[in-house]
Image: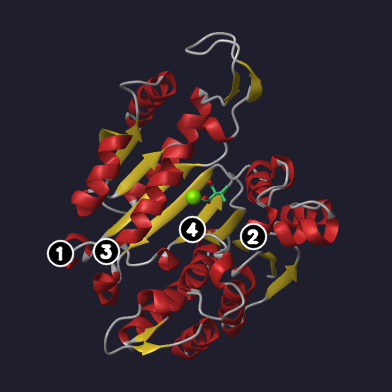
């Protein structure tokens, strides 16, 4: 069976890291049909829009999307609807990718690369389940106006709207509870129910859904406390369930526990098992084109792709084992470099993973 993959490298280091993941996928000897398209700033430069219709149609028709990263200083002054970030937000919305899975796993070899003490992060393995198509990211109304009231009535102001419906909360909660069943049977739901209406609804709804999963322990945590617990005792967490904006912030924080944001893979899934797979990090325009970026997050995202969208568990295990092997062999990109290891380029890291597959 042919699996159709839309490959969207995007901006900055996107091209170089995606190249490595493509190399690894090709080395598996499976029947993948990969088609490339522009996305983000480069798509704006070539076609006048960060998410051209051809790219969107390719993504819709594919079984999965392999995504690099978008964004570049060059495009920061464009009006919002044309900024590179709109491409990823547009894809999430158009494909209904409501479930974002961000595993933060600290490989034993990288405990010293973390900014936290080794005993805090060694053996860490947690999963952030982030809702991805709702919340203040997509809530309307939003915009600019003259303040009708508040501290400075009549002053120019901007506003966004945090919104969640019960079914949106229910479906992401189910993803978290199902994931917990394959792990340690524990879910920590993160909200700000002491202040926000949306969060109170979130908490009430998660408690209702939990009744269908009596075997899973549910705890609740305010987001400010969760931010603290992530650096204080992250190993006490396993599945972290949260909304779009809190998940955005907490997943960057969690990445640092693993040694480098260059290690964090992610999957964004809809209810048809179609998914978009991307590293959790950005386009890093400052190091783009230098062949020094860490491609492992993208390679691990490709492993998630074949696991979740293609049910190729064995091949996904092979990729993850190969990544484990290159780390054990002391192969490192600059961001995870430590004494006694061998520093390699982005493409050499890709080659090392391919070699370790054999
Ligand atoms: C992420 C990114 C995106 C987000 C940006 C690029 C829109 O930070 O995937 O975490 O905020 O979701
Ligand atoms: Mg983010």
Circle 4 or circle 2, nearest the eye: 4
The answer for how far apart the CA atoms under marks 3 and 1 are is 12 Å
Q: CB atoms at circles 1 and 4 under 8 Å apart?
A: no
**Please, is residue 336 above or below residue 64 in the view?**
below
N-term-proximal mark, 4 vs 2? 2
Q: For residue 337, what is the image quadrant?
A: bottom left
Within 10 Å of disc 1 (Cα), the crowding (few <14, some 14-19, many 20+) is few
Determine if the C-beta at disc 2 is less than 8 A from ligand 1: no
Determine if the C-beta at disc 4 is less than 8 A from ligand 1: yes
The answer for how far apart the CA atoms under marks 4 and 2 are is 17 Å
Within 10 Å of disc 3 (Cα), the crowding (few <14, some 14-19, many 20+) is some
Within 10 Å of disc 4 (Cα), the crowding (few <14, some 14-19, many 20+) is many
Image position of 149 (left or right of 73)? left
The answer for how far apart the CA atoms under marks 2 and 3 are is 34 Å
- Label 2: element kind: strand
Residue corresponding to mark 3:
115
Residue corresponding to mark 1:
119
| Residue 107 image position (x, y, % from top left) | 30, 71
The answer for how far apart the CA atoms under marks 3 and 4 are is 18 Å
Q: CB atoms at circles 4 and 2 under 8 Å apart?
A: no
N-term-proximal mark, 2 vs 3? 2
Image position of 135 (left or right of 119)? right
The answer for how far apart the CA atoms under marks 1 and 4 are is 24 Å
Residue corresponding to mark 4:
280
- The residue at the point 68 percent across, 58 percent down is 74
| Residue 157 image position (x, y, % from top left) | 59, 22
Circle 3 or circle 4, nearest the eye: 3
Q: CB atoms at circles 3 and 4 under 8 Å apart?
A: no
N-term-proximal mark, 1 vs 4? 1
Image position of 61 (left or right of 125)? right
Residue corresponding to mark 2:
64
The answer for how far apart the CA atoms under marks 1 and 2 are is 37 Å
């Amino acid at each position: 069976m042919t699996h159709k993959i839309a490959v969207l490298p995007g901006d900055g280091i996107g091209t170089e890291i995606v190249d490595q993941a493509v190399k690894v996928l090709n080395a598996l000897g499976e029947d993948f049909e990969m088609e490339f398209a522009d996305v983000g700033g480069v798509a704006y430069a070539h076609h006048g829009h960060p998410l051209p219709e051809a790219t969107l149609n390719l993504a819709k028709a594919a079984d999965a999307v392999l995504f690099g990263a978008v964004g570049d200083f060059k495009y920061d002054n464009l009006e919002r609807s044309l900024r590179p970030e709109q491409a990823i937000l547009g894809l999430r919305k158009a494909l209904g990718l409501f479930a974002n899975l961000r595993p933060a796993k600290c490989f034993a070899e990288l405990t010293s690369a973390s900014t936290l003490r080794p005993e805090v992060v060694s053996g860490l393995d947690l999963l952030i389940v982030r809702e991805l198509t709702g919340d203040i990211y997509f809530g309307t109304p939003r915009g600019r106006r003259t303040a009708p009231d508040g501290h400075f009535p009549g002053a120019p102001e901007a506003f966004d709207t945090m919104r969640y419906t019960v079914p949106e909360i229910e479906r992401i909660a189910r993803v978290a509870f199902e994931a917990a069943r394959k792990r340690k049977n524990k879910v920590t739901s993160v909200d700000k129910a002491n202040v926000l209406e949306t969060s109170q609804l979130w908490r009430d709804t998660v408690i209702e859904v939990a009744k269908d999963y009596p075997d899973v322990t549910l705890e609740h945590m305010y987001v400010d406390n969760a931010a603290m617990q992530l650096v204080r005792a992250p190993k006490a967490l396993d599945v972290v369930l949260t909304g779009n904006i809190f998940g955005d912030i907490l997943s960057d924080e969690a990445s640092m526990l693993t040694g480098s944001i260059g290690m964090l893979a992610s999957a964004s899934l809809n209810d048809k098992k179609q998914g978009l797979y991307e590293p959790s990090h950005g386009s890093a325009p400052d190091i783009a084109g230098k062949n020094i970026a860490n491609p492992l997050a993208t390679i691990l995202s490709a492993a998630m792709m074949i696991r979740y969208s293609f049910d190729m568990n064995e091949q996904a295990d092979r990729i993850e084992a190969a990544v484990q092997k290159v780390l054990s062999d002391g192969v490192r990109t600059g961001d995870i470099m430590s004494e006694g290891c061998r520093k390699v380029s982005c493409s050499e890291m890709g080659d090392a993973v391919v070699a370790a597959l054999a």
